[in-house]
Amino acid sequence: MAGESSYVERAPAPALAALASSVWIQQVGDRPLAQRHVPHGGAEVRCVLGEAPRLLGPLTTSTYQEIPAGGTVVGVRLRPGVLGGLVGVPADELVDQDIAGTDIWCDLAYVTDLLGNATTPRGALDLLQSFVARRAGEPDRLVNEIVRNLMPWHGSRTAALPALLSISERQLRRRCRAAVGVGPKELHRILRFQGFTARVQASVAQQGAAPVGLAGWAVETGYHDQAHLSRECRRLTGVTPGEYLAQAGAACSCGHDHAASYVPMLGPGNGRFVQERRPIRA
């Protein structure tokens, strides 16, 4: 309907598949929107069309972005461990930072003009993806293994990583902070919470799925109990799990599809979770 906001999320272009987990187009209605960003382990490159792109570094707590009425945003969500190679500085220098892209990339004025002159939001998103793909360096393979082992569906613990990856705990922490922005323990906490969020979104998306309480979701996604989940949710989002889910549900009441983000957080073949779905089309 006219005046309402819309949000379309999908898998990235093939050239970005190893670097980004999802991309999106968000169009805001006739009122400004305070968009909440929750820690997910990676970083984001996003652009309100007509303005210069910005880089949102790895988050350790939730933050908000004000999007003007009538604004259109295109964005790329980077996978954990990609940021260091994209910006050429250690990722831990960018934690909890919202930075103008012009402070990082000297040729961004030209890219800003291209994005602003795109005939469609999909065209602008394609241009932004091409820009990110050209700037990104080769990811640290060891960090890729760290991230893979700490995914919610894998089940590895941070204490096991040094022996598993044949590296000292000090080197493990240094490499992880340089590429991801945070150490393995913090990354594990963030990815575990993303696993909880994904489990909830998957359950909501499954028509006829049996309801599961917070206590069940907490245990399924690696928390000791519901109290443990509540503490972590407050630390990462500032609210209780019930408040967080209510707010997320209200924000997505018009039928936003977040499958591109949550499917990778679910265990493949795990009967408790949904199977992978095809990317949605913009």
Image (cartoon, rainbow, N blue to C red):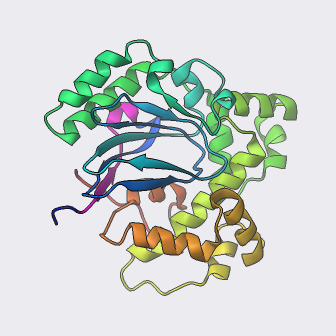
Quadrant position of the N terminus in the picture: bottom left
In front here: 230 or 29?
Answer: 29
Q: Is residue 273 above or below residue 34?
A: below
* The furthest residue to the top: 106
Residue 53 in magenta stretch: no
In front here: 269 or 63?
Answer: 63
Identified at 37% across, 18% down, the residue is 108
Q: Is residue 136 above or below residue 247?
A: above
Q: Is residue 234 above or below residue 141?
A: below
Q: Residue 144's x, y, as percent?
A: 61, 36
Q: Residue 156's x, y, as percent?
A: 73, 53
> In the figure, is residue 33 to the left or right of 239?
left
Task: Please tell me in which quadrant of the rendered image residue 45 appears.
Answer: top left
Q: Do we see residue 148 in this rendering?
A: yes
In front here: 155 or 257?
Answer: 257
> In the figure, is residue 13 to the left or right of 40?
left
Identified at 45% across, 58% down, the residue is 263
Identified at 28% across, 59% down, the residue is 5
* The furthest residue to the left: 119
Q: Do we see residue 154 in this rendering?
A: no
Residue 6 in magenta stretch: yes
> In the figure, is residue 247 to the left or right of 30?
right
Magenta residue span:
4-16
| Figure label count | 0
Task: Please tell me in which quadrant of the rendered image residue 219 appears.
Answer: bottom right
Q: Residue 78's x, y, as percent?
A: 49, 38
Q: Residue 276's x, y, as percent?
A: 40, 60
